[in-house]
Amino acid sequence: MSHSNMHWTRQLASLLVVLIAGLALGVGWSKWRAGHHAAGGGASPASAVPAANPERRVLYWHDPMRPELRFDKPGKSPFMDMPLQPVYADDNANAASGEPDVHVSTAAQQQLGIRLGRVERAAISPVVNAVGIVAYDDAAQAIVQPRVDGYVTRLIIRTALEHVRRGQVLAEVDAPAWREALGEYLALSAGSFAGNSALRAALRQRLVVLGVPNAAILQVEQSRTPPARFELTAPVAGVVTELGLREGAAFTAGTVLARINRIDPVWVDGQLPESQARAVAAGQRVHISTIAYPGQVFTGKVLRVLPALDPVTRTIGVRVAVDNAGGRLSPGMYVEAAFPGRAARPQLWVPSEAVITTGERSVVIVARDGGGFAVANVTTGVEADGKTAILSGLTAGQSVVRSGQFLIDSEANLESAFNRLAAPGASP
């Protein structure tokens, strides 16, 4: 036999072996399916629906492949070709969430470091905490601004961020318009119109409107001589945050010579979490602390909650006025602000570490008698003192897991998946 014929014969033999093996597997699979239906899988749809145990109370019926959906009567699943299964009130399962119990031995609990807490009912006033930055009180800002043209003859305060007292001389200036107005006032007081009080009052008011320093007006009235120079003084005590002129420089009417910010009180501009902003209101007391003065607490009052939400941090601004008589809080300092809550009504609380938030739901692992654990879906409220308010899903006195709950939750999800796969009538 030629070499090509032998090669063709081997290929034909291999193909026959594959075909025979495929036929054998097909026959075996058909026999297995037939036996499976004969054992119970071939029952009619009506007989496939399991009968409920009359001695046990049925909570609802469900499809094990879609446990989140519940039905009030038995029948075929609208999603899978399988009967609905009953869920009994005394089942060893969490009826509220459909999650099965997980049993963990005492030794395993010790190895996992499982710690328990308790659901308690209490009236806790939540404290809202926020971070903030100290800032100048813009409402208490003062501006030194001559109302006429002139020039600076001598600058007393030469740099910004200097502390000044109220009435302290900032600069000496010369202003021709002030000298002219004072000369007219002086001439009227010494001339034939000295007895005309109405005209005298009008000229004096003109000096005030022009912004002539009060000290210069008093000097003219008392000594009958105009001043050699005009002194510009600080109207409030604080910090010179802006200095607009230099010695010898000319200025026009309206030029800002200096800007002074008070340092008592100061503002604290804080950022409140979006979910807690509603718990803060104007007039509320605030406790301020900073690492610059450990152990010391400053008191303040909420001025207003700002009507703007930061789209990046999802926080809402709050402005607080803080007493700063000693000047210890400096603008730019980082501080922590605590907003004590108002009187609260009693409600359920659990340790915050017991709550697992997945983004789609919040769950708590409940410890049952006999070493069992169940997953309970909960609705949470505010947090306070390391505890989280529970609006629904738990009852007072229940034991909850504070540590190791992530492992238990994962085990519960695995058991739920295995139970759905092993449910009667599930597709192979």
Image (spheres, rainbow, N blue to C red):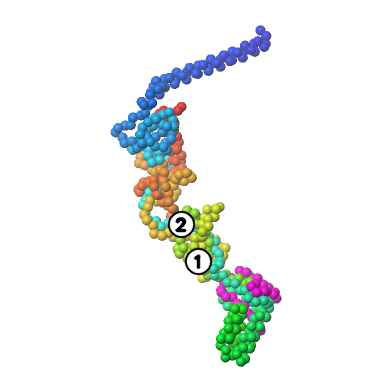
Q: Residue at x 51, y 59 (%)?
A: 307
**Could one spot residue 148 in this view of the protein?**
yes
Q: Are marks 2 and 1 in contact (CB under 8 Å)?
A: no
Residue 424, image x and y in percent?
Answer: 40, 29
Task: Say whether residue 238 is magenta.
Answer: yes
Above/below status of 252 relative to 196:
above
- Foreground label between 2 and 1: 2
**Could one spot residue 165 in this view of the protein?**
no
Q: Residue at x 39, y 30 (%)?
A: 76
Residue 212, image x and y in percent?
Answer: 61, 80
The count of marks equals: 2
Q: As rendered, which of 311 and 8 lies closer to the eye?
A: 311
Q: Amino acid at mark 2?
A: Arg
Residue identifier under label 2: 278
Residue situated furthest left in the rendering: 55
Residue 311, image x and y in percent?
Answer: 55, 53
Q: CA distance from mark 2 to mark 1?
A: 21 Å
Q: Which numbered disc, 2 or 1, marks the residue that appears first in the sequence?
A: 2
Magenta region, residue range: 228-255
Where's the N terminus, which quadrant? top right
Task: Say whether residue 79 is magenta.
Answer: no
Residue identifier under label 1: 322
Would you call the spot at circle 2 few (<14 residues within 10 Å), some (14-19), or many (20 or more)? few
Please tell me in which quadrant of the rendered image residue 329 appears.
bottom right
Would you call the spot at circle 1 few (<14 residues within 10 Å), some (14-19), or many (20 or more)? many
Q: As rendered, which of 367 and 423 lies closer to the eye?
A: 423
Q: Amino acid at mark 1?
A: Val
Q: Residue at x 45, y 57 (%)?
A: 279
